[in-house]
Image (spheres, rainbow, N blue to C red):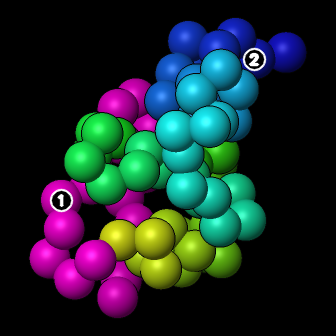
Amino acid sequence: MTHPLDNPVYASLTGPHAALSIRCGNAVRYQAGIASFCGLPAAPASEDWANMAGLLAPGEAALFPLLGGGAPPPG
């Protein structure tokens, strides 16, 4: 069983802060102008990364605190 603090941004954006989020599949982020924090599942698949790319503007910074799934795939 996982704890919400294992992946706090994802837990927040898929729970209490869902109304402040933008979501595509398992990729979730705060609305632009609120925060640059983004969330993915603990072990994101390549599809999750692709969905996140669709939620970000070209050149936009994205922060993934405590994401344990490693670096994003190439591209």
Magenta span: 57-75
Instruction: Locate residue 6 relative to residue 57 in the image: left or right.
Output: right
- Provide the major secondary structure of the magenta segment: loop
Q: Measured along the vertical axis of the image, is residue 3 above or below residue 23?
A: above
Q: Name the element at disc 1.
A: loop
Residue 35 x, y percent position in the rendering = 28, 39
Tag 2: Cα neighbours inside 10 Å, few (<14), some, or many (≥20)?
Answer: few
- Amino acid type at mark 2: Thr
Q: Name the mark nearer the viewer: 1 or 2.
A: 1
Residue 29, can we see it? yes
Residue topped by disc 2: 2
Residue at 36% across / 58% down in the picture? Answer: 71
Q: Is residue 7 visible in this depiction of the protein?
A: no
Give amino acid for label 1. Ala
Quadrant housing residue 72 = bottom left
Q: Is residue 69 magenta?
A: yes
Provide the residue designation for mark 1.
Answer: 61
Categorize mark 1 by other alpha carbons within 10 Å: few (<14), some (14-19), many (20+).
few
Q: Are marks 1 and 2 in contact (CB under 8 Å)?
A: no
Q: Is residue 52 left or right of residue 74?
A: right
Q: Work out whether mark 1 precedes mark 2 in sequence or the reverse, and give the earlier one.
A: 2
Q: Quadrant of the C terminus?
A: bottom left
